[in-house]
């Protein structure tokens, strides 16, 4: 069964203030842009899956040392409202980590993966006390769709991209 198109899965706002307060290290992106960016026209650069250390923990019994499975997505993101040539564009590579994965669905990744925005909502899942994050993004002309249901989400890294201006 395929994913519904991104626009049908994500409601407004893309990331509400109560959701933003639950995202670990969200202030890193907010400080860089002055707000949480929409990720409109951002590009997915990489996805990295780390399976955690469940096997080691189950063998040793050291459950306090458990590291959950994590999917890290790195995006090229910028202030879409700023002129492409202005310093207000503030381009950066932003890495978002999604941990305690319950469901991940990815369809149609390509060599270039611009997205229409990144939606994050809190969702209660039957049988669990704590709510989960529902994270969605979808592609533009080179179609792809991603949906993640996870227990935690954080900004892992932000690397500003400094433009190099050449003088003639």
Image (spheres, rainbow, N blue to C red):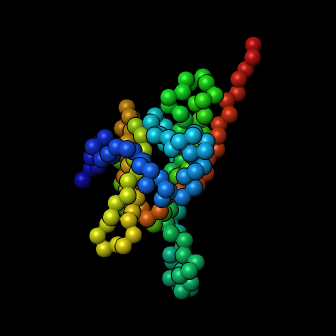
Tell me the residue at 46%/40% (across/down): 38
**126 is higher (above) or lower (below) than 22:** below
With 117 as the anchor, is 91 left or right in this view? right
Tell me the residue at 71%/23% (across/down): 165
Q: Nearer the viewer, residue 85 or 111?
A: 85
With 103 as the anchor, is 17 left or right in this view? right
Q: Residue furthest right?
A: 168
Q: Residue furthest top?
A: 168
With 1 as the anchor, is 146 left or right in this view? right
Is residue 126 visible to us here?
A: yes
Q: Nearer the viewer, residue 163 or 83?
A: 83
Q: Residue furthest bottom?
A: 61
Residue 110 in percent (x, y) is at 43, 40
Residue 132 in percent (x, y) is at 39, 63
Residue 145 in percent (x, y) is at 36, 45
Residue 54 in percent (x, y) is at 50, 75
Q: Nearer the viewer, residue 1 or 129?
A: 129
Tell me the residue at 37%/58% (across/down): 122
- Count of labels in the image: 0
Tell me the residue at 58%/51% (across/down): 27
Is residue 76 visible to us here?
A: no
- In which quadrant will I find the C terminus? top right
């Amino acid at each position: 069964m395929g994913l519904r198109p991104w626009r049908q899965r994500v409601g407004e706002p893309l990331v509400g203030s109560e959701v933003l307060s639950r995202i670990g290290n969200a202030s890193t992106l907010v400080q860089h842009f002055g707000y949480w960016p929409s990720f409109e026209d951002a590009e997915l650069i990489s996805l990295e899956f780390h399976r955690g250390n469940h096997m080691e923990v189950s063998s040793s019994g050291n459950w306090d040392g458990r590291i959950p499975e994590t999917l890290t997505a790195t995006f090229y993101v910028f202030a879409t409202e700023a002129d492409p040539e202005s310093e207000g564009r503030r381009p950066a590579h932003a890495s978002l980590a999604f941990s305690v994965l319950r469901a991940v669905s990815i369809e149609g990744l390509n060599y270039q993966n611009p997205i229409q925005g990144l939606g994050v909502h809190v969702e209660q899942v039957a049988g669990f006390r704590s709510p989960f994050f529902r994270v969605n993004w979808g592609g533009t002309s080179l179609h792809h769709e991603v949906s993640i249901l996870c227990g935690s989400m954080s900004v892992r890294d932000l690397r500003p991209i400094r433009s190099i201006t050449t003088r003639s």
